[in-house]
Amino acid sequence: MSPSALVEIRDLNFTYDKRPVLQGINMTFPKGKMVAIMGLSGCGKTTLLRHIGGALKPSRGSVKIDGQMMQDLDSAGLYAMRRKMGMLFQFGALFTDMTVYDNVAFQMREHTDLPEELIHDLVMMKLHAVGLRGAHKMMPSELSGGMARRVALARTVALDPTLIMYDEPFAGLDAISLSVIGDLIRRLNDALGATSIIVTHDIQESLKIVDYVYFMANGVIVAEGTPDELRACDTDFVRQFVHGEMDGPVPFHYPSGDYRQELNSQG
Amino acid sequence: MAATKTIRAIGHRIVDAVWRIGSATRFFILALLYSGMGFKRFRLIIKEIFSSGVMSLIIILVAGLFVGMVLGLQGYETLKRYGSESALGSLVALSLVRELGPVLAALLFASRAGSAMTAEIGLMKATEQISAMEMMAVNPIARIVAPRFWAGVISMPLLAAMFSAVGVFGGYLVGVVQIGVDEGSFWAQMQAAVDFREDILNGVLKSFVFGTVVTVIALFEGYDAQPTAEGVSGATTRTVVNSSLAILMLDFVLTAIMFRGN
C-alpha cells in the first residue's frame, strides 16, 4: 500500500442474488485528494460507497482504510472507524424531528463530552462555513433542497472527518445551489485536509472540482484519469457520457428480444 | 396440481409468519440489550412519552368517558331487572379495571401511537435517516428504538389507568347523576367489590403486557418496512391489524390465567 493512500480497494467483487454488481474493482484514494466515481444510475456506484463505509461486505477482494481491512473489523471496530468518516446522503437525510442546530450538534453530543457552550460555538462555526448560521432554529421541513444539502454538509463535517463520502451531492439541485455545493465541498476538503470520495453522475460540475475520476459501467471500471485527461479522452464510452449521447456503448434499449417478432406475436 | 400449489402457498405463508415472529423477537431482545444508553439519556424517553403517551391522552380520556357512560346505562338496564341497581358501581368498576380499561386503551394506543411510531420510523428509513445514523457510528436501535420502546411500556399502564378512572366517572355521571342510583351504595359497592391485587394489579399487568406487545410490533414494522411509500403505508396497516389481534388474543390468555375459577 502506498503511504499516501487513505483508501485502497483491491479486486473488489460483490454479488447480490447471484447477480454480479461489482467485478474486479481496483481504486486508490490518496490522502487530501478529491476523487469522483462516475457512471450511470445502477452501475454499482452506491454499492461501492456502502463497501467503503463498511455497510456491505465484499464477496471477494478487500477495502483497506488507513491500513485497516474493513471486512475484518467487528462492530465496535467498525463504529470506531466510522467516527473518522463523514457521509453526505443523496437527499441530505437530515433528522426531521430535530432543528438544524440539533442536527449539526448530533454527533458532538453522541460522541463527545463537550460542554454545551463549546458545542454551541462549534455548531455555529460549521453552520457559518455553509452560510446558514441564521437558519439554526429552523426545522428541516422549512429548508429548501439546496439549504438542506448545505446543513447536511455541515453535519457531515461536524467532527472533522478524515474521509468524507458524498452520495450524489448534486442530485436535484438548481444551478446556483449546484455550484455553491460544489464549491463548498472543495473548500471544506482543503480546509480540513480530508480525503473526499464523490459518487455522482453530474459530470460537468464534478470535473470542475475533483482531482481524479473513475468511470464505472455495469460494475467494472471502464475509464479513469484526471479531469483534463478525461476531457481529452476519445474512447466511445467517455465521449458518450461526457456529451450525454443517447446511444453508444451504453445502449438505449434494455436487452430485449427481436422487435419485429414481438410486434407480430400479439396478433 | 392445484392442490399442491395451494398447500405450497399455505406453507409459504406459515414459514413467512414464523420467520417474522422470529425477527420481531430478535428485534425485541436487541432493543432490551441496547436500552442502557436509552436510560443514560433519560430525556429521550421523556420526549417519547410525551409524543406517544401525552398525545394519546385526549382520545383515551374521551373514549373512557363514553365507554363508562354506556356501561352505566346498559348496566342499570340489566341490573334493574333483578332489583340490584345498587351493584352498578361494582359492575362499572370491575368491567373497566379488569377488561375494558386495559383492552380498549391498548387498542386505541395501537391505532393512535403505534401507527405513528411505525410511520415515523418507516419514513426515517425511507429518507436514509437510519443509514445516516449508522454511518455516524450511532446505533439506531439504541438511539431510536429503545427510547420509544420504554416510552410505550411506561405510558400504556398509565393510559389504561386513566381510561378506567374516567370510565368510572362516566358511569357515575349516568348512573348516579342522571338516573338517580343511590350515590352511597354506588361507591360503597364498588369499594367492597374491587380487590386491589385481584383486579387492579391484574389489570395493570395486562396493560403492561399489551404496551410491550403493541410497541414492539409498531417499532418492528417501522424498522422492517420497505423504504417506499407503499412499504410504509403497508407497515402502518400491519401495525394496527397485528397489534389489535395480538391484544385480543393475549387478553383471552391472560384472563384465563388470572381469573380462572373466580
Image (tube, coloured by chain):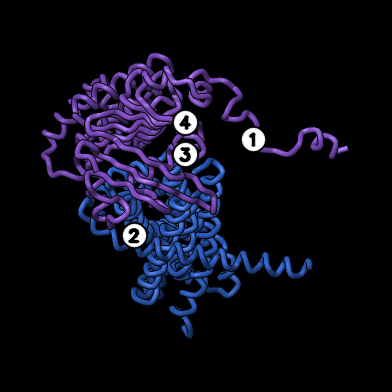
Specify which label sits upstream in the sequence, 3 or 4. Answer: 4
Q: Numbered disc 1: what chain? A: A
C-alpha span from label 3 to label 2: 40 Å
Instruction: Report which quarter residue B233 is drawn in.
Output: top right
Chain coloured purple in the rendered structure: A
Q: Tell us which disc is closer to us: 3 or 2.
A: 3
- Amino acid type indicated by mark 1: Tyr
Q: Position of residue B83 (x, y in %)?
A: 55, 73
Q: Numbered disc 3: what chain? A: A
Residue beneath the point at 49% across and 24% down:
A235
- Amino acid type indicated by mark 4: Gly
Specify which label sits upstream in the sequence, 1 or 4. Answer: 4
Q: Do the residues at discs 2 and 1 belong to one chain?
A: no
- Amino acid type indicated by mark 2: Ala
Residue marked by disc 4: A39
Label 2 Cα crowd, 10 Å radius (few <14 / some 14-19 / many 20+): many
Q: Do the residues at discs 2 and 4 belong to one chain?
A: no
Are the residues flagged by discs 1 and 4 in contact, CB closer than 8 Å? no
- Quadrant of the image for the N terminus of chain B? bottom right
Are the residues flagged by discs 3 and 1 in contact, CB closer than 8 Å? no
C-alpha span from label 1 to label 4: 17 Å
Per the rendering, the mark at residue A220 is: 3
Q: What element carries label 1?
A: loop
Q: As displayed, is residue A152 above or below residue B221?
A: above
Label 1 Cα crowd, 10 Å radius (few <14 / some 14-19 / many 20+): few
Q: Do the residues at discs 3 and 1 belong to one chain?
A: yes
Q: Tell us which disc is closer to us: 2 or 4.
A: 4
Q: Where is residue B45 in the image (x, y as percent from the top left)?
A: 28, 51
Residue marked by disc 1: A254
Per the rendering, the mark at residue B31 is: 2
Q: Numbered disc 2: what chain? A: B
Q: As displayed, is residue B76 above or below residue B58?
A: below
